[in-house]
Amino acid sequence: MAEKERVETSEAQIAVHWQEEGYYYPSTKFVAQANMTDETIYERFSLDNFPNCYKEYADLLEWYEYWHTILDTSDAPCWKWFVGGKINASHNCIDRHLKNHKNKTAIHFVPELEEEKTEHITYQELYVRVNEFAAILRDFAGLKKGDRVTLHMPMCAELPITMLACARLGIIHSEVFGGFSGRACADRIVDSQSNVLITMDAYYRNGKLLDHKQNADIALKLAKEDGQIVDKVLVWQRYPGKNSSPAPMVENRDYFVNDLLKDYYGARVAPVPIAAEDPLFLMYTSGTTGKPKGCQHSTAGYLAYATGTSKYILDIHPEDVYWCMADIGWITGHSYIVYGPLSLGASTIIFEGVPTYPDAGRAWRIAQDLDVNIFHTAPTTIRALRKIGPDEPAKYNYHFKHMTTVGEPIEPEVWKWYHKEVGKGEAIIVDTWWQTETGGFLCSTMPAITPMKPGSAGPAVPGIHPVIYDEEGEILAAGSGKAGNICIQNPWPGAFQTIWGDRDRFVSTYYERYNKDPNSKDWRDWPYLTGDAAVQAEDGYYRILGRIDDVINVSGHRLGTKEIESAALVVEEVAEAAVVPVAHDIKGKEPDLYIALKPGVEPSEALSKKISDAICEEIGKIAKPRFVLLVKDMPKTRSGKIMRRVLSSISNNKDVGDVTTLANPEIVTEIQEMMKKK
Ligand code: PRX
């Protein structure tokens, strides 16, 4: 039962405890234009009005058939929202805007190379391109409603085009972050049983054109070894009409989309009415075991929640220019680059590259040139921009009304720089706490209603009712000063429906811990375990401290320690592997990897590198450890359990505490000495 094993070192245990800060208030100018200024929203979305309150979000969408049951709990804890409704996400993100806004930019695609022109795709053009590609998916690839298709695409306009073409037909898309390796892509192809892969030949990163097609070849080979055959690979081209990858195209398997499109010119595909609770997409994320989980998101509930929270928390109006710098390969990009903003008819920016290339001013030039007024990014990026160009924002003439931070706790000091320098003291900030599983925000201030407090994710958003439990299941009250496991008491429409193909794991990971009765059909008996530790201040604001499980958050990317450990164990010389999170001033956390070698194997620099390379190959560069330490033995309990807590203290330069009860206390000093030399 690896899933349920208690972990000795969690992120929360090495979390920083900041001082309480004072409030910051939005300007009257911001409030005057905000989408939501009515304080009764909290009352309307109170538990007394649950679940009917969510009709407000459903009514932001266009339906083919209106739903009859707002929440069906008969299959608890797999909640069904808006049952009886029929809807199409592609229609809601595109077609419904054509009448009034066809000539408006839906997507600004900004290439990484500054000398390349930004592409402005109008809603009409998006409509045409999505229709033509949908015709390829249906008529050439033979895909139909309910089929899964894996996407391994970088940041490009073709990614939302592909997603929306899938959504038009009810095909379940599963986008794998472009920076993930072929191996990681293969695992997701196998788990979702996809027989079509959609990819791109190349993309720019830090000024270099990377060969991406090669990952598809690796993925297909490895997927085949695991029994999943992909028969078609659709390859978008970074430069249409030109192949930018040296990887050969395999005959009768690999097809350039741009070649196929010639046969589908002018094709139109009517959006298929999809049952509200049919899945829209899968998004794989890391958990306690080595195997990533396919979070299954619904069509109507998800879209309603992404749209509602984009409107009220991100304050997106149709005339806004909105830039979220996350990657669409993560949930933030799905909800808050693609589905939310396009459902509201806004202009959303897709930036191919890194904000620090070619220099620290790049992000602000984009903001100035496109007149961006809503900006959304992660603390890791804010820290990096602050470090390399603290005075850069002031050099550019842009004005944000609203800024978001997401993905990890933000230090008050960094928050204040973001507010003063990036936001020029004018923009409000929302610190949004949520997860791949939750589809949309859980905690955040309401920008025109509740004041901001640096270092705090704010109160729960309307309609979300958290509770913090201690290990015994007692509720920790606001202002108690005690941290516990933050859970959500009630279901909400954006929540994922299950783990693809593994309902038992879904129930045991997220609902078993504080469940009151496994046979209950009453949602009140099923608090959702987020996996985060949190503390609630007297004013009701939550401070998220980090993960309580085997998950570490590196630059806002969620990685499983077990995933990294399993990757290390692929190297034949490795006997045991242990990963611990280390505090890092830009990335938030990074992994340190401790390795015990098999008997008779000599440690060497080359071997450390081999292990590090194996991790990049198995998962991707984002998982690369800071150090690979080849130790003689792991510190262990007498029952043989690796003491990650001790390793974590060594990595984080902290007191290791009492180690005399270990089976091998002498190894601790030896490892400490090794670390000093690093
Ligand atoms: O630990 C929390 C942290 O990121 C985890 C979720 O990661 P992921 O599923 O990749 O989704 C990231 C984007 C929503 C959470 O369990 N986290 C996310 N947002 C915050 C945060 N920690 C503190 N403050 C936040 N605003």
Image (tube, rainbow, N blue to C red):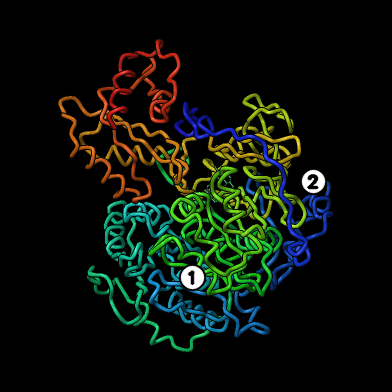
Name which residue lies at 42% across and 57% down. Answer: 177
Identity, as a three-letter code, of the amino acid under mark 1: Lys
Q: Is residue 253 above or below residue 132?
A: above
Neighbourhood count class around disc 2 (C-alpha, 10 Å): few under 14, some 14–19, many 20 upward = some
Q: Quadrant of the C terminus?
A: top left
Position of residue 531 measured from the top left corner of the image (x, y, whole percent): 56, 38
Identity, as a three-letter code, of the amino acid under mark 2: Leu
Picture quadrant where residue 631 is located: top left
Q: How many marks?
A: 2
Name which residue lies at 44% across and 64% down. Answer: 149
Position of residue 142 measured from the top left corner of the image (x, y, whole percent): 42, 73
Residue extending furthest toward the top: 660
Position of residue 42 measured from the top left corner of the image (x, y, whole percent): 80, 51
Whether the residue under disc 2 has CB within 8 Å of ligand 1:
no
Q: Nearer the viewer, mark 2 or mark 1?
A: 2
Q: Which residue is mark 1?
A: 144
Contact, CB < 8 Å: mark 2 with mark 1? no
Query: Could you say which is closer to the camera, residue 454 or residue 502?
Result: 454
Residue extending furthest toward the bottom: 266
Is 511 on the left or on the right of 489, as rendered?
left
Position of residue 624 measured from the top left corner of the image (x, y, whole percent): 34, 45
Query: Could you say which is closer to the camera, residue 77 or residue 447?
Result: 447
Q: Is residue 12 above or below residue 57?
A: above
Neighbourhood count class around disc 1 (C-alpha, 10 Å): few under 14, some 14–19, many 20 upward = some
Q: Which residue is mark 2?
A: 47
Q: Tag 1, which secondary structure? A: loop
Name which residue lies at 41% across and 23% down. Answer: 646
**Residue 635 seen in the figure:** yes
